[in-house]
Image: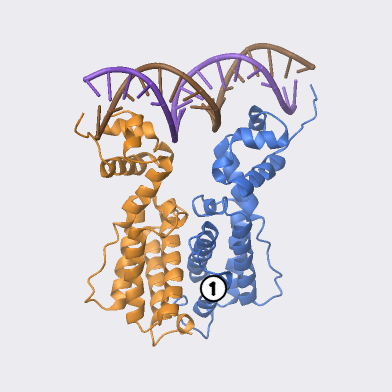
Chain colours: A orange, B blue, C purple, D brown
Amino acid sequence: MGRPAQISRPAVLAAALEVADEHGLDAVTMQAVAARLGVTAMALYRHVRSKDDLLDGLVEALLTEFPPPDPSLPWRERLALTATAVRASAGRHPAVFPLLLRRPAETDQARRVRDGVLAALREAGLDDERAARAERLISTAVLGYAASEAAGRFGHHAREVRDADFEILLDVIGACVDPGGSRSCRE
Amino acid sequence: MGRPAQISRPAVLAAALEVADEHGLDAVTMQAVAARLGVTAMALYRHVRSKDDLLDGLVEALLTEFPPPDPSLPWRERLALTATAVRASAGRHPAVFPLLLRRPAETDQARRVRDGVLAALREAGLDDERAARAERLISTAVLGYAASEAAGRFGHHAREVRDADFEILLDVIGACVDPGGSRSCRE
DNA sequence: ACCTGAACACCGTTCAAGT
DNA sequence: ACCTGAACACCGTTCAAGT
């Protein structure tokens, strides 16, 4: 007894993310992840409860890629930085990213990201209820856009076109939240 | 020979949709769909090329639930009607709906829906390029919202709150497109 | 022409057994 | 304590065989 562990939960999640990035979500089988770590599939069950738990862990790992922006920056820039980080993450992990829209937003990392956005929106002058509503709409629009782009729904368009689309999305969000802009999000 | 067919592709898709609605996407196995039709799993392969083809057919079937709005209605109302139909479809088919965001938008039904939205946007005064861009952003926001709501990402909120969120989303879209509103989508 | 039975390679998961 | 071998029920898919 006291045998040292060959693998760990973070190592399992990292291996699973690599498999997903390289070969797609369907290729993420317990055997493929285990093989990448040099163990058998059964060894994974010591570090993840089930395959579903593994996928939840993958989502949580993705969320760590959205770092909290420097709080000294203006709120508009903080929102844009987070949105851009989300979009970049979708580009790196197109297979896993769509899971963000299907799994509950009630994990530690999800709360952390949401709290950052909420803080920016309150700084823009929205009260708690309006900020919460704006956060739901903004996160949905940004996740939806990033997921669509990563899935290739806009694939036949050049990168410049997609970049311009994303800029406009950020503009609309900004205008909607800004005290001097369209007031839809503030009323 | 000349043996009459017991099942058809539409029947297979309808059975698969029922299974998905009742028991989730993971429950959509070839055997489960076949069992609902009273045949064996192998019989399905005469009507769908593969399970992937079956899922593509399911997406196509969902898209038929967004009927083209009466063209005599004003563009704003047409957009709202389509968006509302999309949201209602997500509510009826929460398991299948997320596939809309992951599969290509280059099918007959997808084109039909997109053309309807594009026509409304041109009527609002957008040129071809701006209308195409607005369509991408609008469809993404609406699909993202509907998928999130159906997946329960907003599940802890009361229906009234979600209805109000959706109204605001429609308002923002309208303001963004309207000649007299915020000009982000028109510049 | 349409469906079935048998078979194949694979999947997630369990459990007792090894070290 | 940690990992493995063997086993189970299931999955998508094929192909020759039945009617």
Q: In which quarter of the image is the N terminus of chain A?
A: top left
- Residue under pointer 1: B161
- Spot the residue most to the bottom: A180
The reply to whether residue A154 is visible in this rendering is: no
* B107 to B1, vertically: above or below: below
- Where residue C12 appears, as percent x and y from the top left, is 44, 35
B49 or B129: nearer the eye? B49
Type of residue at label 1?
Val
- Where residue A161 appears, as percent x and y from the top left, is 40, 63
- Where residue A156 appears, as percent x and y from the top left, is 45, 54
Judge left or right: residue A11 versus residue B130: left
How many badges with numbers are in the image?
Answer: 1
Judge left or right: residue B117 versus residue A7: right
A72 or A40: nearer the eye? A40
- Which quadrant would residue A170 be assigned to in this image? bottom left
Judge left or right: residue A111 versus residue B63: left
- Which quadrant would residue B7 be assigned to in this image? top right
- Residue shown at 60% from the left, 45% from the top: B23
Structural crowding at the residue carrying mark 1, measured as other residues with C-alpha within 10 Å and reported as few (<14), some (14–19) or many (≥20)? few
- Residue shown at 38% from the left, 83% from the top: A178
Please, which chain is the residue tagged with disc 1 on?
B
- Where residue A79 appears, as percent x and y from the top left, is 33, 71
